[in-house]
Amino acid sequence: MYLILFVLNDPEKVEKVLSAWEQAGVGGVTILPSTGLGRIRQKQGLRDDLPLLPSLEDFYRHEADISHTLFSLVETESLVDKVIAATEQAVGDLNLPGNGILAVLPVVRLQGLIKSRPDSDE
């Protein structure tokens, strides 16, 4: 099993990447708003107008100022290859600046992933 992490700076491409990952065979994706050291140093990443306990809606007011970190677990290396190809088809060559950063990590232990509910017929 592998963990795919993708940091996408362009919020307009999130839907395109999600569709590409689904078509490649990814079953689920978690998306988090994120920022990096460069934006913090430029004072774009930290906002002083957010409440102490912000809601997701608070982050979306300035969606263009944040990155999105997508992550998913996939079972095979061949699916990893499909996801990388689908990602590059959606955003462009990942070796070019500004298209995002993708990392793949092997998962050596996994607990808590339930593929079907106990009450289902699967």
Image (cartoon, rainbow, N blue to C red):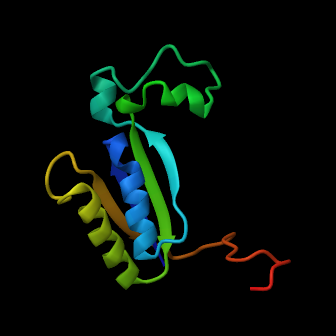
Residue 98: x and y in percent read 20, 45
Outermost residue, right direction? 119
Instruction: Identify the residue shown where x is 42% and y is 49%.
Output: 69
Residue 22: x and y in percent read 46, 68
Give the number of marks.
0
Q: Nearer the viewer, residue 18 or 53?
A: 18
* Residue 5 located left or right of residue 30: left
Instruction: Identify the residue shown where x is 51% and y is 14%.
Output: 49
Image quadrant in which you'd find residue 20: bottom left
Q: Nearer the viewer, residue 115 or 92?
A: 92
Determine whether 117 is above or below 53 in the image: below
Image quadrant in which you'd find residue 70: bottom left
* Residue 29 located left or right of residue 120: left
Determine whether 115 is above or below 97 in the image: below
Residue 19: x and y in percent read 42, 62
Outermost residue, left direction? 96
* Residue 75 located left or right of residue 43: right
* Residue 31 located left or right of residue 13: right
Instruction: Identify the residue shown where x is 27% and y is 51%.
Output: 100
Residue 61: x and y in percent read 48, 24
Instruction: Identify the residue shown where x is 49% and y is 79%.
Output: 1
Q: From the image, which quarter does the C terminus lie in?
A: bottom right
Q: Is residue 3 visible?
A: no
Q: Is residue 52 visible?
A: yes
Determine whether 53 is above or below 28 in the image: above
